[in-house]
Image (spheres, rainbow, N blue to C red):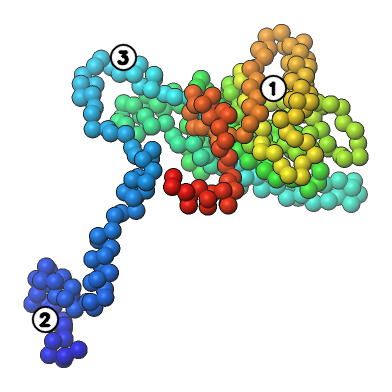
Amino acid sequence: MDPENKLTAKRCKNLSGKALVDELEKRRSKRYRALERHRKMRIPRRRWVLRKFSMRERYNTTSSFALFSELPVEIRIKIWEYSFRGRTVEVCVDFDICFGYDLELQIEVPCYPPRIAQCTTITPSPVTLFVNRESRMETLRCYTNLLPGVSDFPIYFNYQLDSFATRHYFSRHDIRGNNTMEQLSWEIALLINISSSVLLRPIRSLTFPTCFIYDYGIVNPHTQQTQGSIYSAFIEPLLTEFDCLREIIIISGKRQKYSRSSGFDNATELQNLENCLDRTFEAEMEKNSSFQIPEVKIYTEPFLLPIFRDEMEQANGSRVYENYDLKETADWFDSEY
């Protein structure tokens, strides 16, 4: 570079803001300027994605009801209440449980009391929390923070509309040979005890979206179990912990390659579950005459659990899995769609 043309501090001080920017632009290499022009000419990636997948475009929100604020407050509150949609609130809980082995008793025992390492939700909060002050106040009146002090962020739940879903408690084989159903119900009771949250007990609807059930009824492969007995260990604690339970939704997990059972696709196992439910509910009716039998819904085909409950029937029967095959995904991206 010519020393006479060198950009010194004295020259920078004499140049104005825009003049300095122009001077710096001129001193950049030709290759840099060419790449910069090429980058500005390209279509932004988000616009390209929306153009390729038109179903991802957002609805036009230019139209609005300008006279809404002039309505009587009673009508506005009713409108906010009717805008609430029932959701499936999926809660992901990671327990920190360490087991040791007692040589004298020859059993596994916890090394220290179990604790909750992490508690989050993948379900978005109600949209009315972010509209205006009035909608937020009405939403907070109808929704409860389900696990205060336990979850990383507030988990808003409406007992009348929402369903509580446990997500991925046990998503792989248990190497000890224990039954996943029994452990799943134990974890739910553990969540209530550790969190000391009485807010969980009034829940009216429970959903198990990924109830990965391997080898039904096989606690010990060498011991013959009574048909359907393991379901009692799964259902009975739920009736004890949740006093107001009115609905149980069970969704079969994706069939596993090396599992001894075919899951809920097996008519025998499905019948065993139904028989167990009948016996469990009859026993509860004998103990408590005011006991109300919850409605049980069993979905035999795995599908991606929708956020809103009114979309359950539409999602049922669709071939949408949470874990896609890599080759299938690559072929889909290479296709014209």
Residue in the foreground of this view, choosing between 316 and 125: 316
Callout 1: helix, strand or loop?
helix
Residue in the foreground of this view, choosing between 133 and 177: 177
The kind of residue tagged 1 is Leu
* Residue most extreme to the bottom: 3
Q: Residue at x 35, y 45 (%)?
A: 50
Q: How would you rate the neighbour count of disc 2 (Cα within 10 Å): few for under 14, some for 14-19, many for 20 or more?
A: few
Q: Position of residue 187 (x, y in %)?
A: 69, 37
- In this view, 24 is above or below 40: below
Viewer-side label of 2, 3? 2
Q: Position of residue 317 (x, y in %)?
A: 58, 29
Q: Earlier in the sequence, mark 2 or mark 1?
A: 2
Q: Residue at x 60, y 41 (%)?
A: 93
Q: Position of residue 308 (x, y in %)?
A: 48, 28
Residue in the foreground of this view, choosing between 151 and 30: 30
Look at mark 1 in the image and give the residue it sits on: 239
The answer to whether residue 254 shows anywhere in this view is: yes
Look at mark 2 in the image and give the residue it sits on: 11
Q: CA distance from mark 2 to mark 3?
A: 68 Å
Q: Quadrant of the N terminus?
A: bottom left
Q: Residue at x 71, y 30 (%)?
A: 265
* Residue most extreme to the front: 336
Q: How would you rate the neighbour count of disc 3 (Cα within 10 Å): few for under 14, some for 14-19, many for 20 or more?
A: few
Q: CA distance from mark 2 to mark 1?
A: 81 Å
The kind of residue tagged 3 is Glu
- In this view, 187 is above or below 104: above
Q: Earlier in the sequence, mark 1 or mark 3?
A: 3
Callout 3: helix, strand or loop?
helix
Look at mark 3 in the image and give the residue it sits on: 74
Q: Quadrant of the C terminus?
A: top left
- In this view, 22 is above or below 141: below
